[in-house]
Amino acid sequence: MKSKLAFFACILGMQLSFTTLHSQTIQDNGDFLLIADAPGEGFENAYHLLADRSRIIDMLNDLNSFLALPYNINIHFQDNEGPYYYQGNIMMNYGFLNHVYSVFNEAGYIETQEDLDMILDVVEFVLYHEIGHALVEAYAIPITGKEEDAVDGLASVLISEVLEDPEMALVVADLFALQDEQVEEFEEAHFWDEHSLDAQRYYNILCWFYGSNPEQYQSVIEEEGLAQQRAVRCPGEYQQLFNSWGRLLAPYIKE
C-alpha cells in the first residue's frame, strides 16, 4: 500500500511536470474550516458522537497542509438539510448521522460503543466526497461523466492514501448495500437522480478497495460477491483514479 507521503510525493512530482509546461502562481487564500452548531431536539446523540472532533480536524489539517485554496470552504454541521455542497459550504446534517446509526443498528452492526466508530467512518468518506465537489468548483476541474461517481472515486483514493485506512471503504460499501436492501420498489427518482444507485456505489467502492491492494484484499472477491469479471479490472481502475486525481490536483499543491 502506498503511504500518505508517497501520495503527496506522487502529486508533487506531477506538479513539477505540470508547472514545467504551465507556469503559474498558486495563491493560498483559504482553508477548510469546521463549524459545528449546537444540536436541536433529537440530534443530541449525533452531536455528542462528534464531541471529539479530532478525527475530522486531523483530516482537514492534512488537506490544509498541502492544498492551496482560493477561498475558505466551510464544513458546517447543523440540523438542516444535507449532506451537500453549495457555494463554498459543505452542509453536514446531524440527521444524516442519525440515519446512518439507524441503518447499521437495524442490521445488527451496532453492539458496542466502539461500533459507533463506523458512523464516523461514513462521515469521513462523505466529507471527502463533498470536498471533491468543492474542489471541482474551486479549481474549475474538468469532469467527464457523472461528477458524483468521480468524487466517489476521489473519496476512495483519499481514505486509502491520506487516511491510510482503506478498510474504511468496506464500512461505507456496507451502508450502500443495506440502503439498497431497504428499497422495496424502484421509482423514477432512483434513475434520474444524479447519484448512481446504492447497489452500483456498493460495487464501485468494493472494486476500488480491492484494486488498491489486490494481494491483500483478495478475500473481497469471495466474501463480498465482487464478480471476477469486474475484479480483474479493479487494480487498473484504482490506479487510473490515483493518477487522474493526482494530475488534476497537482497544480494546487503548496510548495
Image (cartoon, rainbow, N blue to C red):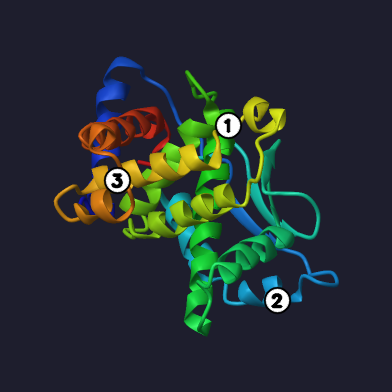
Quadrant in which residue 92 is drawn: bottom right
The location of residue 246, given as percent across then percent down, is: 33, 34
> Which label is found at residue 8?
3
Position of residue 160 relative to residue 48, above or below, is above
Position of residue 251 relative to residue 64, above or below, is above
Q: CA distance from mark 2 to mark 1?
A: 33 Å
Q: Looking at the image, is mark 2 or mark 3 earlier in the sequence?
A: 3
For residue 139, say whether it is visible: no
Q: CA distance from mark 1 to mark 3?
A: 20 Å
Q: Of 109 and 8, which appears nearest the observer?
A: 109
The residue at the far top in this view is 21
Position of residue 198 relative to residue 26, above or below, is below
**Can you say which quadrant of the picture contains the C terminus?**
top left
Q: Looking at the image, is mark 1 or mark 3 earlier in the sequence?
A: 3
What residue is at 79 percent from the left and 70 percent from the top?
Answer: 38
What residue is at 33 percent from the left and 53 percent from the top?
Answer: 224
> Which label is found at residue 138?
1
Q: Please rate how many residues cluster around mark 3, counting C-alpha atoms within 10 Å: few if below 14, some from 14 to 19, many from 20.
A: some
The residue at the far right in this view is 41
Residue 244 lies left or right of residue 51; in this view the side is left
Position of residue 19 relative to residue 44, above or below, is above
Q: Nearer the viewer, mark 2 or mark 1?
A: 2
Q: Of 118 and 57, which appears nearest the observer?
A: 118
The location of residue 208, given as percent across then percent down, is: 32, 42
Quadrant in which residue 187 is drawn: top right
Q: CA distance from mark 2 to mark 3?
A: 36 Å
Q: Nearer the viewer, mark 2 or mark 3?
A: 2
The location of residue 179, given as percent across then percent down, is: 58, 51
The residue at the far front in this view is 184
Q: Name the residue type under label 1.
A: Ala
| Disc 2: which residue | 45
Residue 53 lies left or right of residue 76; in this view the side is left
